[in-house]
Image (tube, rainbow, N blue to C red):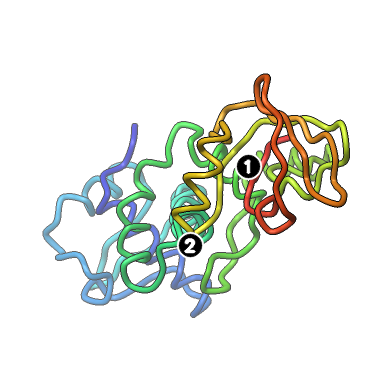
Amino acid sequence: MKLSEKAEEILEALWVAVEEKGRGYLDIDSVGIPADDPSYAELTEKSFIEVKNGCVYLRPEGKSEGRQTIRRHRLAERLMMDILNIRGEDGDRKACQFEHLLNEGVDAKVCTMLNHPTTCPHGKEIPKGDCCIEAERQGDMGVVPLTELKSNQEGEIAYIQTGDSKKMQKLMAMGVLPGNRILLMQTFPSYIFRVGFSEFAIDTQMAREIFVRR
């Protein structure tokens, strides 16, 4: 059963305490969620945490869930910065909102789209998921710029990464949309590709902004 958002935030805080202080507990006041909030009882019932003497402790049973919770949070941070180009406090706030949606395998899809990042934008480790381990085993490149493909290689368009609205409109008009198949026909002197029954030529910079799943 999915945890509440506040319960996930408590696990995140405890996981960070383990990372930064080497201890799996915090004063309840420093968690940022009032001691009478139902989320503590929610986690206690699952034996994920223990509350005593004004402190909240991360139990061994809660470590796996805490690991997955912090993984979703840091993947959401990467998504905001790398794909949506939302940075600073606004990016952090939106990442906190979005992370709670990355359940039931959605985190693996986002992780694959981001090419299995190892750190968040703040340099903290993103715990590996099963998708990362499988990608390493298979030598899977995941999602890469169009420039990483060779002539006559084909892939599925994952996303476009550009802050230029005119360039975005131009690519979309070509049919460069997530989910469409793209065939790279030529890489020099310009990149020529086919989407559907149409062929287009673009420069290297624009090709770098098209990300495909091989």
Dot 1 crowding, Cα within 10 Å, few <14, some 14–19, many 20+ = some
Q: Residue at x 68, y 43 (%)?
A: 143
Q: Residue at x 56, y 31 (%)?
A: 175
Say whether disc 1 or disc 2 marks the residue closer to the N-terminus: 2
Residue denoted by label 2: 81
Q: Position of residue 79 (x, y in %)?
A: 49, 54
Helix, strand or loop at label 2? It is helix
Q: Position of residue 21 (x, y in %)?
A: 49, 80
For residue 16, the mark is: none
Alpha-carbon distance for marks 1 and 2?
16 Å
Residue denoted by label 1: 112
- Tell me: 108 left or right of 181: left
Mark nearest the camera among 1 and 2 is 2
Q: Can I make out residue 211 in this image?
A: yes
Number of marks present in the image shown: 2
* Foreground pick, 71 / 203: 203
Give the vertical position of 6 relative to 214 (above or below): below
Q: Position of residue 140 (x, y in %)?
A: 79, 40
Q: Position of residue 36 (x, y in %)?
A: 11, 59
Q: Can I make out residue 76 in this image?
A: no
Q: Residue at x 79, y 45 (%)?
A: 136
Q: In the image, what residue type sits under mark 1?
A: Thr
- Tell me: 200 left or right of 153: left
Helix, strand or loop at label 1? It is helix
* Foreground pick, 110 / 20: 110
Q: Residue furthest bottom?
A: 21
Q: Residue at x 24, y 45 (%)?
A: 42
Dot 2 crowding, Cα within 10 Å, few <14, some 14–19, many 20+ = some
Give the vertical position of 67 relative to 133 (above or below): below
* Foreground pick, 56 / 82: 82
Q: In the image, what residue type sits under mark 2?
A: Met
